[in-house]
Amino acid sequence: MNSYLNIFDSWQNLATNWSISVLKSILVMVLGWWAVNKICKMSLLFFQKSISDKGIASFLYSIVKFSLRVVLVITALGCLGINVGSFFAAIGASFVAVGLSLKDNLSNLMSGMVLVINKPIHVGDYIEFENVKGTVIKIEMLFTTLQTEDKNKTVIIPNSKLSANSIVRQSKYDVSLIKRVYELDNFSEKYNEIKWYFEKEFILNNKILQIPPPNIEFETFKDNKTLLKINVWSMNKNKKALQEDVENSINRASQKYAIHFKEQPVESESHTGKL
């Protein structure tokens, strides 16, 4: 009889200790989760005020949020009596297997760092990617989030896909398209030579962006009217100087090929760029 009582007492003590550990772990998770959310909000405000690039701010915020939540989970496991040291040892022993299973996430993480450092896109850019169009609202550790034209929908794209594929970017920040249309006063059979002349001029001009490349086109109509259309991209800071360079290239071509280029009006001289 005494043996049964001893077993009952030991189980009762074990259940009591386990219940206390579970309650303590739950309390740590609840209070810790609340504290982590508060810290994350404060860090987000700090990053937004101290870092002008919203993409970097959101990326750093996602790292802080992930790190704090990992620490919180580990602390809660410790409250349950789980040996955290052996837990980390087990993780270390299976690191290769975990790395292989999470290779896509690791690729997304590294790609997210590339996006933040090289800045091919910014928060606020309107981009076209594959069959998706939308405004970049977040660049995080693993994913980039777009707000589509339908305000009720968002699209989440893995960072590895964004860094490995072509993106059409419409940015309000830094680039402009300069458009020029000229009518030629006489017909010339040297259109290919003239086009190559402008292509060479624009390749050598470091104020002109090469992605997307400059576009030079001739368009001939039935009445022998011929138009030269020039589209070049530049950083906004180089826009004025580049406009002068384009005019100078036109003047040199006019003298070289004995052709008068009469400028024609265009719908929009420059607008927000696409990259």
Image: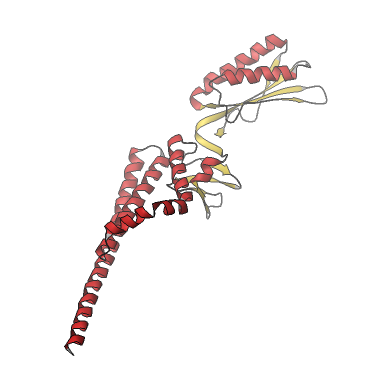
State the residue in front, 6 or 164: 6
Identify the coloring.
Answer: secondary structure
State the residue in front, 46 or 80: 80
Question: In the shown orientation, is residue 208 left or right of residue 26?
Answer: right
Residue 193 in picture, x, y percent from top left: 72, 17
Residue 202 in picture, x, y percent from top left: 60, 20
Residue 123 in picture, x, y percent from top left: 46, 42
> Most extreme residue toward the bottom, as rendered?
1
Which residue appears at 76% of the width and 22% of the height? 226
State the residue in front, 72 or 128: 72
Question: In the shown orientation, is residue 186 left or right of residue 75?
Answer: right
Residue 105 in picture, x, y percent from top left: 46, 50
| Residue 236 visible within the image | yes
Which residue appears at 47% of the width and 42% of the height? 111
Q: In the rendered image, which quarter is residue 222 located in?
A: top right
Q: Quadrant of the C terminus?
A: top right
> Most extreme residue toward the right, as rendered?
222
State the residue in front, 183 or 201: 201
Q: Quadrant of the N terminus?
A: bottom left
Position of residue 178 relative to residue 138, above or below, is: above
